[in-house]
Amino acid sequence: MENKTKKKIHTLDLTVGNIPKGMVRFALPVFFGTLFQLFYSLADTRIVGSFLGEGALASVGAVSVLANLMIGFMNGMALGFAIPVARYFGSGNRQGIKKNVGNIITLGAGMTLAFTFFSLIFMDSLMEWMNVVPRLYKDAKIYISILICGMAATFAYNAGAGILRAVGDTLAPLLFLVCSSVLNIVMDLCFIRVFHMGVEGAAYATVIAQVVSAGLCWVYMMQKYEMFHIYPGDLLPERGYMGELASAGFSMACMNSLVQFGTVSLQTSINTLGQDIIVAHTAARKVTEIFMILFSVIGSTMATFAGQNYGAGTYDRIKKGLVFAIKVNLMWCALVFVFSHLCSPWLISLITGTKGAKILQTGALYLKVDTCFYLIPAFITMLRNMLQGIGDHITPVVSSTLELLGKVVFAKLLTPLFGYWGIIWAEPAVWAVMVIPLAVQTLRLPLFQKPS
């Protein structure tokens, strides 16, 4: 009786009950968790810009997307690993959950160590490819190298948080992120203002905060949930579970990294446009992450919602959940459009701490144009996460590949001709292409077919 009560308190079964209520209950902690994750990323940017100057901020901005590419691959894998857990939870298979979690630890540890090692080995080549100018090179390399060394902690937190969300517990990951966010800001100020560690201090603060959140997450999992009590035998690789995890994990990782790789391609061109453009775009991308926060939250919700209901065989609920998600995103896109056109320069100034007219105007221009097309990425995020949740690991990767190819073309062809305008128009054009395979595949699913 005690175990059943504990399950009701901590987990959320999305296969039964009111669909909007269940999705909102799941999504709210994810929303605030993602917001706090962005918050301490913004804190890094603001503190670096305010106390170290625009040169240091440009150094960080020149390689931030490269760090996001590498870390995004591992985080995508962690999120993908959680999808089979959601399906096992929906079907009531607790032994399957336990074996999956054990194999996640084994596979994740090996992949993280290998990825970190090779990232550091080829760091100079990667930075050369990024067109990082000599005067930014030293600080940029220090910053990204420290972040990459802390990749294991970032993966550990995201894997633990993904597993908890797969069984409907979204509150605990939020609380852990709040703690790490506050810690990150305090250490940022301490390392930079008191110990004068420069951009190195900002990187160390981020990594230490991730270590704390990861530790809290896994201790909580082991203490609160019997199904997460892992024994040595559960860590032994099993072909069935490993295959399932590899399929979901690498698909999500490839999807994330292809998206980030395309952004890196754009950054290689941006890095040739001068310090003001780099700073403006870095700030605009930070604001974009805030504006698109609900897209990622709804996407995470759809992945777990679809996964649980697919495992339970309640397919009609998936369709109804997607309709509700579309309505929420429509309202959010309208709100963001109005806000961006009223407050963009102020937002750029808030993040960078600068009053430079060129930086403020350039960053604001990017935001005002791209927010006109936000409904497209809203659909992209919803559909590809839903498809991942029901086991389609190919179509989302195809869509992300189109994004990569499109951004590479824009970076190499349009930027030399149109300068920063080529960057501004790149993403809306690519979004319009990449949504097509997702929409076609979704409409082909049996649950979206009209009965004959």
Image (cartoon, helix red, strand yellow):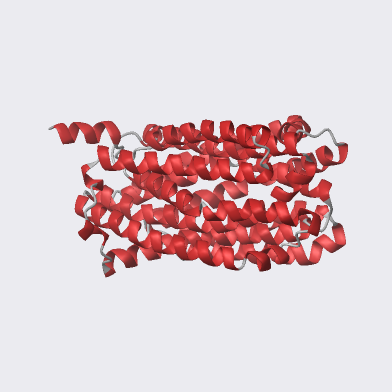
Quarter of the rendering occupied by the N terminus: top left
How many dots with numbers? 0
Spot occupied by residue 328 in the image (x, y as percentages of width and height) = 52, 36
In percent of width and height, residue 232 lies at 22, 57
The structure residue drawn at horizontal position 26% and vertical position 67%, both measured from the top left corner, is 238
Position of 278 compared to 296: left or right?
right
Q: Is residue 176 left or right of residue 147?
A: left
Q: Name the residue furthest left.
A: 1
Query: Image check: 270 left or right of 93?
Result: right
**Quadrant of residue 374 in the image?**
top right
Residue 123, above or below 282: below
Question: Splitting the image into 4 quarters, where does residue 388 fall?
Answer: bottom left
Front one among 130 and 323 = 130
Q: Is residue 255 visible?
A: yes
Point out the residue furthest to the front here: 195
> What residue do we see at 24% from left, 53% from top?
98
The answer to whether residue 440 of the structure is visible from this angle is no
